[in-house]
Image (tube, helix red, strand yellow):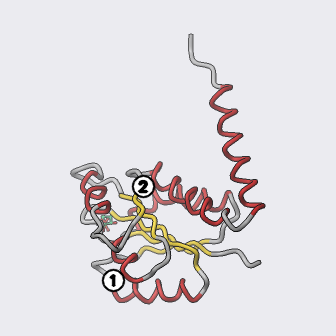
Amino acid sequence: MPKRLVGVVMGSASDWDVMKAAAEQLRAFGIPYEARALSAHRTPEALERWIAELEQKGAACFIAAAGGAAHLAGVVAAKTTLPVLGVPMPSKHLQGLDSLLSMVQMPKGIPVATFAIGEAGAANAALFAVAMLAVADEALATRLMGFRTDQAEKVIATKLPD
Ligand code: RP5
């Protein structure tokens, strides 16, 4: 069975420093992805073309990150019925609270699964994509379980300073 692709899109190349956490997590699980900087406002036509292209390539879902007005994930969700996982980016003046509140307020009927602001949200969106793909991929489910076990072992082995 060919591996399903994840589309990773961000409103600006300035989001990459945070969003590389999603790419790293996908890579760690061997999930193919295509990452692009495309904006709901600055490049709407190119965004629409890219979404259609990814659907053609058999994408399983999209991870969409944006800051401030943060309409990107909502616009992606308007253009595809594939699951859209939104990651609010930290912003200069409001530390990403603006991005979070904007992204989470989707109108009834067009959902965006919204994650935490910043790096934790980026990594968790990727892990959520892995979990969705693992529903139909037993080997991937086993690797995800292994990741959780390793993580738990690290927490338990951590010694606090005296
Ligand atoms: C948003 O505006 C982007 O997603 C980014 O988080 C923010 C700032 O973008 P730049 O001005 O750095 O391109 O659209």
Q: Is residue 16 above or below residue 62?
A: above
- Distance, label 1 to label 2, CA atoms, is 24 Å
Indicate if the residue with disc 1 has its beta carbon within 8 Å of ligand 1.
no
Q: Secondary structure at mark 2?
A: loop
Q: Residues within 10 Å of mark 2 (few under 14, many from 20)?
A: many
Q: Residues within 10 Å of mark 1 (few under 14, many from 20)?
A: few
| Quarter of the image where one finds residue 111 | bottom left
| Quarter of the image where one finds residue 11 | bottom left
- Closest to the camera, between mark 1 and mark 2, is 2
Residue picked out by circle 2: 115
Q: Secondary structure at mark 1?
A: loop
Q: Is residue 51 above or below residue 107?
A: below
| Quarter of the image where one finds residue 10 | bottom left
Which of these two is toward me, 89 or 2? Answer: 2
Residue at the farthest front position: 108
Task: Assign the N terminus to one quadrant of the image.
Answer: bottom right
- 128 with respect to 16 (left or right): right
Q: Earlier in the sequence, mark 1 or mark 2?
A: 1
Amino acid type shown at disc 2: Phe
Image quarter where ligand 1 lies: bottom left
